[in-house]
Amino acid sequence: MRHVIVGAGPAGVVAADQLHKLDRDAEITLISGEAEPPYSRMAIPYYLVEQIGEEGTHLRKNPEHFSGHSTRVVHDHVESIDPGARSVALRDAGSMGYDQLLIATGGRPVKPPIPGVDRPEVHPCWTLADAREIIRLAQPGAKVVLIGAGFIGCIILEALASRKTELTVVEAENRMVPRMMDDTAGGMLRRWCESKGVSVRLQARVEAIEDGRAGHGAAVRLGDGQVLDADLVITAVGVQPNVEFLQGSGIDTDTGILVNRQLQTSVEGVFAAGDVAQGVDFSTGEYAVHAVQPTAADHARVAASNMAGRSQAFQGSVNMNVLDTLGLISSSFGLWMGKDGGDSAWVEDRDRFRYLNLQFEDDRIVGASALGLTDHVGVLRGLIQTRVKLGRWKERLKQDPTRLMEAYLASTRPIGYNAHVL
């Protein structure tokens, strides 16, 4: 069996390892669009602060790992797919046949339509090549403007502040991380960042990136006319799935590649996984792209099992984000923004930067968000993912949302269990 995997990020690598485990006689080809060994983008911030070297970003540390797992790594770009001929067209190496194909091409950063965005001082933070340029430009004391305070932006923020740059964050929305935090949590995160010396501009739009002043390489002009000096500008305004090369293939796409519960696309023998796959959302039953590494790994294992003839269904991904911003941990799970007809409970300590918000549907927790609270975060996810009925513990949690562990133990133990926590 010839298995071809397009994309050498976490989804592609996990799938390759799973295929080798399930089908030892298979020929596995992993196609990477970059010259680097397969690596994790999530490790780049640790590289930026010199906690690890470049090799620390590699998904498999042993250089012989792939050859030892019957996997050939090809550094090339896939230009198109011909499902009828069961082949992929490569930019440099012609065509390659397959019996089963997995598309794990991930996403790419959105390039904002800002005049001057192509200047040499402007970079996303997405690849190792980007990281090398950021390290070169983000020297201590350098003025850095970060455009975007979403999830990716706040991951980069941590690294930039650690490099002792003079950092200004510009965000178009009214709060930081607007897709995982409400106004209360987003406002607390802003105060936290400002207390650490980071300047945060909310509801601000960049009009242009221009020639620099007073020895700085660039200048960022905002909509209110203010100009920010910059030695480095980083754009982090969103990510979009890499699906353009599928045009004319017959593979159905929406935001990403539409897949069923077996992670198979609309075309027989073609599967998709990771940030490019639009699969089932556990909380809503609808189809969505969840661009987080745990979902990529789950997708990969299910897709590989089905490619190897071991039928397996994906139960749906829980929308989940965990973020460390200058030492303050924030997280969100499931329907953190709530559900129509549901109710909620929350507790906050603004002075200590602590916040917990629980969202209910009937007597189940369907979503949650937290700031500065790391105890029992796994329990929170478990309560959502197992759809545990809380019974009388719902009202107790509404009185004190921090009693999550007690609620979990009481709600998941067999009837008649008499724990001291009750």
Image: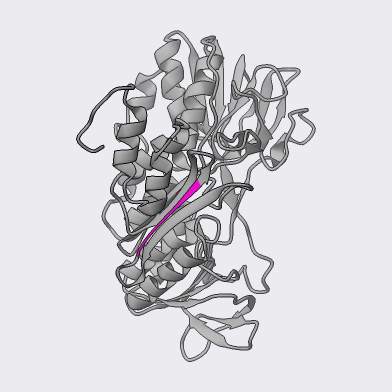
**Nearer to me, 148 or 31:** 148
Q: In the orientation shown, which residue stands out farthest toward the left?
A: 420
Instruction: Please state the extent of the stretch shown in magenta in the rendering.
Output: 354-359
Question: Residue, x 33% and y 54% (percent of image)?
Answer: 47
Query: What secondary structure predominates along the stretch shown in magenta?
Result: strand
Residue 44 painted magenta? no
Q: Is residue 231 above or below residue 277?
A: below
Q: In the orientation shown, which residue stands out farthest toward the bottom?
A: 214
Quarter placement of the C terminus? top left
Apparent side of residue 194 relative to residue 274 in the rendered image (left or right): left
Res. 284 in view: yes
Way the structure is coloured: one colour
**Nearer to me, 119 or 355:** 355
Apparent side of residue 192 relative to residue 82 in the rendered image (left or right): left
Question: Residue, x 45% and y 8% (percent of image)?
Answer: 25
Q: Is residue 335 above or below residue 324?
A: above
Question: Residue, x 41% and y 67% (percent of image)?
Answer: 189
Q: How many marks?
A: 0
Residue 357 painted magenta? yes
Percent position of residue 340, x then y: 64, 48
Quarter placement of the N terminus? top right
**Nearer to me, 30 or 329:** 329
Percent position of residue 257, x then y: 67, 34
Q: Quadrant of residue 166?
A: bottom left
Percent position of residue 406, x then y: 29, 40
Percent position of residue 115, x then y: 68, 74
